[in-house]
Image (cartoon, rainbow, N blue to C red):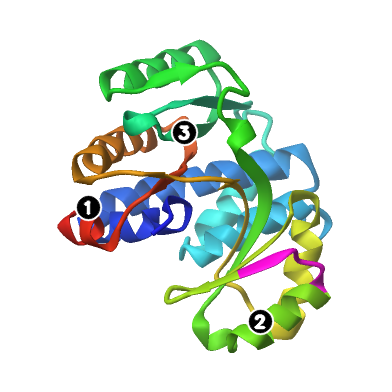
Amino acid sequence: MAGHSKWANIQHRKGRQDAARSKLFSKLAKEITVAAKMGDPDPDKNPRLRLAVKEAKSQSVPKDVIDRAIKKSQGGDAESYDEIRYEGYGPGGVAVIVEAMTDNRNRTASTVRSTFTKCGGNLGETGSVSFMFDRKGQVLYPLEAGDEDTVMMAALEAGAEDVETTEDGHAIFCADTDLNEVSNALEAQLGESESAKLIWKPQTTTELDLDGMEKLMKLIDTLEDDDDVQRVTANFEVSDEVMAAL
């Protein structure tokens, strides 16, 4: 069970959904505000904003929250955020990428470094682990969208590179620069997707036992609890037996 596609399942089984959902809404709204401020406030004219709004809708963010985030970007008092990537190793030698949006680089760097140290990891330099990942666009569809062959054909016609079908659904991958176009083309053939976003796709994975997985979960949970951290990616793999034990 590869980590990049299973972390949501682990979170779901752990519970604490209300607090996590509230924090997720806040982070998705921040992405919308930043995307709208950097480009046009009209999603149809701003690919990054369109994808941010699409991702927010896929997570059931209310329309008024989305509209408020876009409106906030046009105000003179809108905060300015820097986008920063941190890289390091977690428990068991798992490679970890942390993506953040912050109005205070020193605060965020200090917090991320402290979290890695306290949770048995080591924060490295930029580029220290990202070479083990590929930057890709990912579009997710439920199994109901069609059988594997149908989705594969639609993906190839849309300009995608690969499709992974599991019991959780279809994950379609494309070049990061093609995500908006591929997402639009897939939508025309398969309907609305569950999600369309940029990800770090691991080239290889590190398998963890139960103890290692529990330590890694603590690291990722603590990082994701930070308001400056947008998303965390790790190249772990976990067996069905360890998943069940969690």
60 to the left or right of 182 = left
Residue that numbered label 2 is attached to: 151
Q: Residue at x 63, y 77 (%)?
A: 192
For residue 188, what is the image quadrant?
bottom right
Verify whether residue 162 appears in magenta. yes
In the rendered structure, which disc, 2 or 3, sits on the residue that comes first in sequence? Answer: 3
Q: Is residue 72 above or below residue 120?
A: below
Q: Residue at x 78, y 74 (%)?
A: 156
x, y percent for residue 53: 62, 58
85 to the left or right of 111 = right
Q: Which stretch is magenta?
A: 158-163
In the rendered structure, which disc, 1 or 2, sits on the residue that comes first in sequence? Answer: 1
Q: Nearer the viewer, residue 215 or 40?
A: 215
Q: Amino acid at mark 3?
A: Val
**Mark 1 residue element:** loop
x, y percent for residue 10: 30, 56
Mark yes or no: residue 41 visible: no
Q: Residue at x 80, y 57 (%)?
A: 178
Measure how far apart labels 2 and 3 are at the Cα level. 31 Å
Decide: few, some or many residues near mark 2? Use Cα within 10 Å; few <14, some 14-19, many ≥20: many
Q: Quadrant of the N terminus?
A: bottom left
Q: Is residue 206 above or below residue 175?
A: above
Residue that numbered label 3 is attached to: 96
